[in-house]
Image (cartoon, helix red, strand yellow):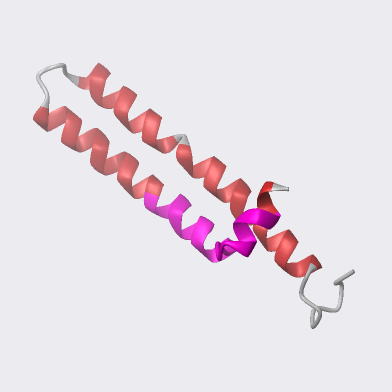
């Protein structure tokens, strides 16, 4: 299971959530940077912003999966199995 492997490598839910929020900020930064730094105009800037912005839902989903795994495998948690 991928979530178990990531957890064993030290990745925690908080790390995934941090990456999700960072990707939201990076999406804005990449949009503005592309708009100002490239002659291709707003269409190119929109593509960069959307590309980076699509990472956030993946990181949030990974954070939820890790949080569930951590909850289920924490012997001190009341709902652990």
Q: From the top left corner, tell me how far across and down residue 81 is, in percent.
A: 90, 69
**Residue 61 versus residue 33 in the image, above or below:** below
Q: Is residue 16 magenta?
A: yes
Residue drawn where x is 18% and y is 30% of the image:
34
**Residue 73 versus residue 54 in the image, above or below:** below
Q: How many marks?
A: 0
Residue drawn where x is 33% and y is 40% of the image:
27
Residue 71 location, quadrant: bottom right
Q: From the top left corner, tell me how far across and down residue 21 is, in percent.
A: 43, 53
Question: Which residue is farthest bottom?
Answer: 76
Residue drawn where x is 45% and y is 59% of the image:
18
Visible in this render: residue 65?
A: no
Say whether residue 77 is left or right of residue 54. right
Say whether residue 72 is left or right of residue 3. right
Decide which of 9, 65 is in the foreground and name it: 9
Say whether residue 66 is left or right of residue 53. right
**Residue 20 versus residue 72 in the image, above or below:** above
Residue drawn where x is 57% and y is 64% of the image:
12
Q: From the top left corner, tell me how far across and down residue 39 is, in percent.
A: 9, 19
Query: Which SS does the magenta portion mostly show?
Result: helix
Q: Which residues are magenta?
A: 4-22
Q: Is residue 14 magenta?
A: yes
């Amino acid at each position: 299971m991928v979530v178990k492997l990531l957890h064993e490598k030290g990745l925690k839910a908080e790390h995934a959530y941090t990456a999700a929020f960072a990707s939201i900020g990076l999406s804005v930064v990449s949009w503005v940077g592309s708009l100002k730094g490239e002659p291709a105009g707003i269409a190119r800037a929109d593509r960069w912003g959307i590309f980076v912005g699509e990472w956030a839902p993946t990181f949030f989903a990974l954070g939820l999966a890790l949080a569930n795994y951590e909850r289920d495998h924490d012997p001190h948690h009341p709902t652990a199995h």
